[in-house]
Image (spheres, rainbow, N blue to C red):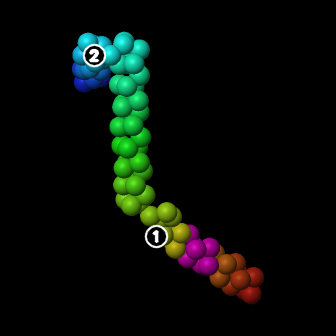
Amino acid sequence: MLAVYGMGALTATIIIVLDLFLPLWLAALIVTVALFVVAGILALLGRRQVSRAVPAEPREAVASVKADVDELKHAVKDRGRA
């Protein structure tokens, strides 16, 4: 939680430093755009890692359910003959 306050303070400090050379609104806009660019890049990297980490479907679970369904079908057919 303290890191969130630290990031806010760092953001404010960067805006204040840029305000020495640029108008305040432009300094704030530059910092905001930079933060959104960094957030977008991190989101894309995270999305790529998640897509590589887990398969699209749980293959073992699907195979297990299919085997269960087949077993039940055979049990029902055998029960009907008896």
Residue 7, given in percent of the width and then of the height, sits at: 27, 23
Q: Is residue 66 magenta?
A: yes
Residue extending furthest toward the right? 80
* Circle 1 SS class: helix
Q: Say what amino acid the circle numbered 1 marks.
A: Glu
Q: Residue under circle 2?
A: 21
For the residues labelled 1 and 2, the Cα–Cα distance comes to 60 Å
Picture residue at 37% right of the left edge, 25% below the top? 30
x 36%, y 12%: residue? 24
Whether residue 12 appears in this view of the structure is no
Image position of 32 with respect to 64: above or below: above
Which segment did they paint magenta?
65-71
Give the residue drawn at x 49%, y 63%. Answer: 56
Q: Residues within 10 Å of mark 2 (few under 14, many from 20)?
A: few
Q: Could you tell whether 60 is left or right of 65 in the image?
A: left
The answer to whether residue 60 is above or below residue 76 is above
Instruction: Give the image quarter of residue 76.
Output: bottom right
Instruction: Determine whether 23 is above or below 37 in the image.
Output: above
Q: Quadrant of the N terminus?
A: top left
Residue 31, position in %: x, y? 35, 25
Q: Amino acid at mark 2?
A: Phe
Residue labelled with disc 1: 60
Q: Position of residue 63 (x, y in %)?
A: 52, 73
